[in-house]
Amino acid sequence: MGFLERLKDGLKKTKEGFVNKVSSIFTARTNIDDDLFEELEEVLIQADVGVKTTFTLIEKLKDDVEEEEITEPEELMHYFQSELKTMLQNDEGGFNFNHDLNILMVVGVNGAGKTTTIAKIAGRYKEKGKKVMLAAGDTFRAGAIEQLQIWGDRLGVSVISQQEGSDAAAVAYDAVQSAHAKGIDLLIVDTAGRLHTQTNLMEELKKVKRVIDREASAINAEVEVLLVLDATTGQNAISQAKLFNEAVAVDGTALTKLDGTAKGGIVIAVKNELDIPIKLIGVGEAAEDLQNFDPDEFIEALFSEE
């Protein structure tokens, strides 16, 4: 199964819960009026597109109607899809790991799928012939270190770790030093799945980032911060992203569990409200279900007739 087919399959709930409702607004009407826009506004907000993004979309559609002299609701639906694609335009999805050593610091709350995402990224780049190392920087949660070591064994990549409760910044320091010494291409640093409301843990996260940045600059390594967000948490994901971005300057997001929500509008809200590139989306459990985000493919999969 190709990824477009996987994407279509993984977005079934969103298609049924969001896209079909949107489509029916356009196809069930014979003229474009205030009622159409009000109904569309309601469906978009219910689908976690967010109030701010919804208002922006509605205003753009009203402008399209006036400028293009659109009279048919079905024709307006094509403009709606086009506006969504424009909103979702991104830096290129995925990563360009072009430095001798590339460091990916992965952050997010517990339960978002952080460890699984790390394992899938590690597996992907190992298959491409890259030398990959993991760092067990989540010294806070019981079992987190062991969980990452199990993945390391399964993938055949080394894991830098210390005992539970140790200083996460010290783990990060050791990992960068070891990765540099061993000629590693990609170092992925796990961090504690802290609640974004826990101030002390967010401060620790800042410390880990400072240590990584300092050590990376000394050896000309590239550092990126990836925020893993659970798409099923809806608007709460926006709140999380804002706080993580304030703490560690997020470079990109990975949206997981899109197959588990009927409110896939969160993808649009994340991109439009935060202006942080969406790097990866996950639509299932298999390694192949985590893929580089492509806005055109995403919209095509959502609005396909199949």
Image (spheres, helix red, strand yellow):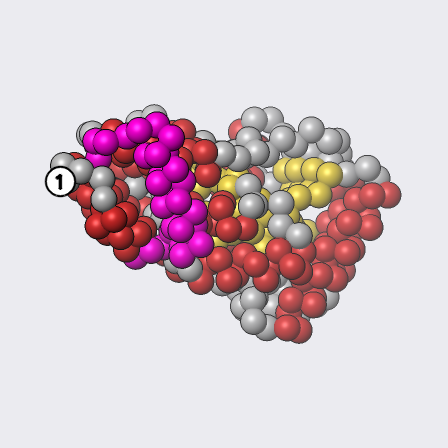
Residue shown at 49%/46% (left/top)? Answer: 272
Q: Quadrant of the C terminus?
A: top left
Q: Residues within 10 Å of mark 1 (few under 14, many from 20)?
A: few
Q: Quadrant of the N terminus?
A: top left
Magenta stretch: helix, strand or loop mostly: helix
Q: Which residue is mark 1?
A: 28
Q: Is residue 49 magenta?
A: yes
Residue 14, position in %: x, y? 28, 46
262 shown above or below 123: below
2 shown above or below 151: above
Identified by mark 1, the residue type is Ala
Is residue 40 in view from this perspective?
no
Residue 76, position in %: x, y? 28, 33
What secondary structure is found at the residue carrying circle 1? loop
Position of 158 with respect to 60 (left or right) is right
Residue shown at 82%/48% (left/top)? Answer: 215
168 shown above or below 260: below
Q: Is residue 128 magenta?
A: no
Numbered label tally:
1
